[in-house]
Amino acid sequence: MILSALRTATLTAALSAAAAAHAAAPAPAAAGARANLACHVGAYRLDDGRSLTLGRIDDPAALRWRLLDGRTGKLANKDGALVSTGGWGERADGVKVALGRCGEGIVFEGHRGEPVKLDVVDTAFDGAGVKLRGRLVLPAGQDKVPVVVMVHGSENYSGVDLYYQQYLFPSEGVGVFVYDKRGTGGSTGKYTQNFHELSDDAVAALAEAQRLGGARVGRIGYLGGSQGGWIAPLAASKTPQAQFVEVGFGLADGVLAEDRDQVVLDLRAAGFGDAATLRKARELTDATGLIASSNGQRGWTELAAVRKKYEAQPWWTSVKGEYSGLVATHTRDQIMAEFKKYDYEVSWDYDPMPVLRTLKTPQLWVLGGDDIEAPSEETQKRLAALGRAGRPIASVVFPQADHGILEYEKDAKGERQHTRTADGYLRMLLDWIKRGTLDGWPYGTAKQLAGPK
């Protein structure tokens, strides 16, 4: 969520690859294929009543289909035929999709699908010292509807271009306001991970959604995923108009906890989960956390001491984390060079608990019990305690879900291949947005930790 780009084998290789990917323009053939598919982006109503969306992804020559139950796949032209590959993998899943002419219907697994009419308004509005690009998407008509403002995670791409919720949710009766976070897409400013600035932008986004929607806006609130789990509640604390907050796969803990808890999972997976080893690893993450949070100005003496004590021990090479493994295995000069390139103004010192303890706006937190990007064990404990203490927080966990509330299977190398969004997750979000309650149980494999249903 914070420095995930630093997880590759070498820091410089990661940056070179990322720079090349962003700099490269689509090849003419890819651009042509993109043009053929782009006009089909939107929501469709299948003849059995289900909602299906076709949305853009980072591959310019492909689309992603999604169903409300969480099934998903990538569509791309291959050897003159439209092929679906399941989840986020490259294996054909046998799902048959036929696209007609632009603006016409589709056929999905033998079911005819007609385009869902939506009311769409594009806008530009003022954030905290920046101009932000946004879009309000409502179900067609004049009825009052609930509206959710999408709060970015750490991604650096355009939410207006790529957020699928702007099609899926309105097809289910919920309006969506999407915007490009500062420094991304069509928004000005510098990309940042300063939660305070980003929360101010989110406040402005909600106000713009209300302005555009006018009398059609009913309940309105925020949905923040991943890093957005720090930002959305903070924005709500500044926004009396917000009537709900939803957080998906976020942390009710500080930023440094993400790396620390990932290291614990690394060591447990490698067979080094005993208490003594985890205490030693905590010394390491305390040192690397000090280096990261001070932008390399402190922590090197502490890291040198930890290296001297433990570098030769067998568990040392199993440490990965968000950044600890890389910081521990590279020189000071290498790390400092990368810090200069990744000047994101991360809110390292942000503690979410004061906001969560005092925020009166009802919240729904949905966690993955098998999340290795943002390990949720401590967050589950904290949210359950807040719920028992009477705070208006409902917390739910999908026990086998990874980050993004995604299900997965392991490949031959033991690496996770995400296959779908967990069944029940999207329906749960919609129920809470519409009514502020979870009255549609069961939601797949979800289990409630605490709070009102």
Image: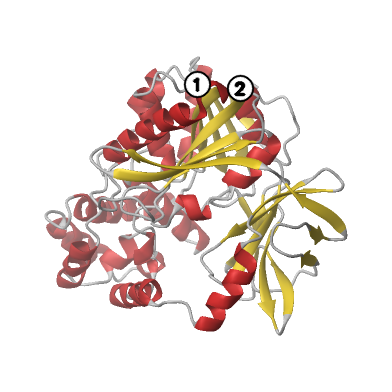
**260 sits left or right of 308 in the view:** right
> Is 319 rendered above or below residue 140?
below
> Nearest the camera: 453 or 169?
169
The disc at residue 436 is 2
> Nearest the camera: 215 or 10?
215
Q: Amino acid at mark 2?
A: Gly
Q: Residues within 10 Å of mark 1 (few under 14, many from 20)?
A: some
Q: Residues within 10 Å of mark 2 (few under 14, many from 20)?
A: many
Element type where label 2 sits in the image: loop
Residue 155 coordinates in the image, percent (x, y): 41, 55
Element type where label 1 sits in the image: loop
Residue 295 coordinates in the image, percent (x, y): 17, 55
**224 sits left or right of 253 in the view:** right
> Is 16 rendered above or below residue 133?
below
Who comes first in sequence, dot 2 or dot 1? 1
Image quarter hosting the C terminus: top right
Tag 2–tag 1 contact (CB < 8 Å): yes
**For the point 48% across and 16% down, which residue is it?**
389
**For the point 50% across and 55% down, which residue is it?**
161
Mark 2 vs mark 1, CA separation in Å: 9 Å
Q: Amino acid at mark 1?
A: Gln
Q: Which residue is mark 1?
A: 243
> Is 280 rendered above or below residue 356?
below
